[in-house]
Image (spheres, coloured by chain):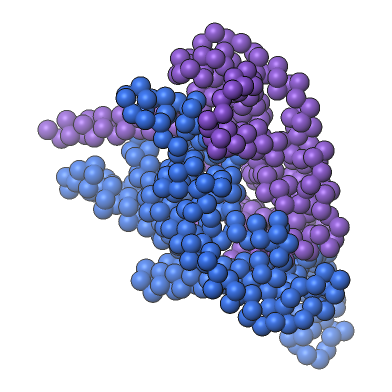
Chain colours: A purple, B blue
Amino acid sequence: MRLRNVSMFDLINGSMLTLICLIVLYPLLFVISASISNPAEVLSGNMWLWPVDITWYGYERVFHNSDILTGYVNTILYTAIGTTVNLIMTVLAAYPLARADLPGRNLMMALIVFTMFFGGGLIPTYMVVRDLGMTNTMWALIIPNAVSVYNILIMRTYYQSSIPGEILEAAAIDGSSDFRTLFRIILPLSVPIIAVMVLFYAVGHWNSYFSALIYLTDRELYPLQLFMREILIQGQMEEMVNAADSSHAQTIMDEEAVKYAIIVVANLPIFLLYPFLQKYFVKGIMIGAIKG
Amino acid sequence: MGQSQTAGIEGVALKPIQPTGKKKGKLYLAVKRHWRLYVLIAPVLVYFAVFHYLPMYGVQIAFKDFIGTRGIWGSPWVGMKHFERFFDSFFFWRLLKNTIGISLYELAVGFPIPILLALMVNELRQGAFKRIVQTVTYAPHFLSTVVLVGMVVIFLSPSTGIVNKAIEAFGGEAVYFMTEPAWFKSIYVFSGVWQQMGWSSIIYLAALTSIDPHLHEAARVDGASRLRRIWHINLPGIRPTIVILLILNVGSVMGVGFEKIFLMQNSLNMESSDVISTYVYRSGILGAQYSFSAAVGLFNSVVNFILLISVNRIARRLDQTSLW
């Protein structure tokens, strides 16, 4: 009786989770299949799961599109520089704040955490960035987002919980300065958490479009996401608003092919790394949860 | 923790030099000894001063008529003029209704689902299936907002989208999902659930692993079923986590995200898609009405902050759990 009860539970639980997985997976598979299918088949609805009449046409178009190439190069650059700045700033904040013997630590902590809950808002921030002359430069995407409070908290929690105080004391007794302790002891011990931070920040930069939207007007500086917005959303919206106009069938077909291919190309770096990164991401959230 | 011991090293030699003011001397010594730490954190403090506290100071333009040539400081005060204009405007109630409506809808649907998912995944035995479920459900979190909305638009397209193809195949008529105001909020909320449910469940899964297995053993001996144990052990076990996240969510009811709504917005669905943050962007960044938009933004931040503090206080009273 009891055994059957248990297996009944497992059966229902398992099938519901399977269903959830299929719901999550289907749109992703559809995009990948559509990206290598003949656009005519996709548009007519003949392609619904597996690729039909395989073609690399969409990818060819993507790699010949100068906007997309510009965007890709820019995004790689912004992600690399932005993540480096983020990482340095996070360590610079987290290490002193993790030191229980630092006077003023609680005050600094409070000032930093307060910004999580209250801020001047979009317009005053925009005016500061503009007055600093950062608009229309890549620094507008990097400096105003130089560090995330949440990540400072995660890193600080890690330092407090995973690096024994005795090590720091021993280092101090041996005459190691706070700089030396940071570079020789703290940093080598924080490789796992730095990996988590790199991933959090890099994915954030790779996927962000908001700062670019408000601070950049020069198309040469646009990150990939802004070009993708034009291709994926604005084009489609226009088409939907003027739905009656379907005269240029070939153009629509071309656009369709590019759309699926660009989604795959834009997410390729992250999804290639995803299996390796997954455990780090999860670890990062768990460290955050200890505090929460 | 190790203050007394470490203070000894240089402190012994320096103490006699500071004979008066016991407390002051101690602080002075500590600061002197740790000047390097202050050097390290200085750039971070400068960053927060410039990009977070300076805008808070600059928000005074909400009470002024900003004139570019005279700067923030030199522009004339006008009191609550911009706030009054906003409260009286045609947009005010629409913006408020949409902002709160979308948030509450999202909260009602998007908040419980990750908890359920975590409880379900937690019941799986360690193994390949569990790993697959986790890997698959976390994946959409890494799609950018642009890609997510792009996919939604593609799938829901009235002429070429697969959803409408399916509706037509069953004899229905194509639905103009993205341009029909009535559909906006549901599309927003459910695409969000699709993208984030797995990722949001991680924190609950983490909390579930810290539940004492002895509780389950004891309950099993007493003949409690799986469902009963989930209800009486697992759910209470993650209650503090649930409360904290609920505080954060309710506290940001006014702060509904700009990024996704802005991308899903078009001239035909504005009636149900226009929220405070998108309005601030349009009137401020595009329309250059700095003072007015800053006032709208400030109204939003203040309401949000008050909400957060109130919810936090209520939670502390009812549940002894709070953010601070």
Q: State which quarter of the image contains the N terminus of chain B.
A: bottom right
A230 relative to B226 in the view: left or right: right
Query: Where's residue B125, x and y in %?
Result: 36, 32
Numbered marks: total: 0
Q: Viewer-proximal residue, A282 or A173? A: A282
The extreme bottom residue here reads B20
The residue drawn where x is 66% and y is 66% is B293
Picture quadrant where residue A281 is located: top right
The residue drawn where x is 56% and y is 25% is A246
Query: Where's residue B212, x and y in %?
Result: 36, 50
Q: Viewer-proximal residue, B295 or B239? A: B295
The residue drawn where x is 65% and y is 57% is B281
Query: Where's residue B98, x and y in %?
Result: 47, 58
Picture quadrant where residue A80 is located: top right
The extreme top residue here reads A53
Above or below, A260 relative to B216:
above
Above or below, B268 relative to B140:
below
Above or below, A139 relative to A57:
below
Picture quadrant where residue B286 is located: bottom right
Q: Viewer-proximal residue, B193 or B272? A: B272
A29 relative to A55 in the view: left or right: left
Residue A30 appears in the rendering: yes
The residue drawn where x is 22% and y is 48% is B228
Query: Where's residue B168, x and y in %?
Result: 37, 25
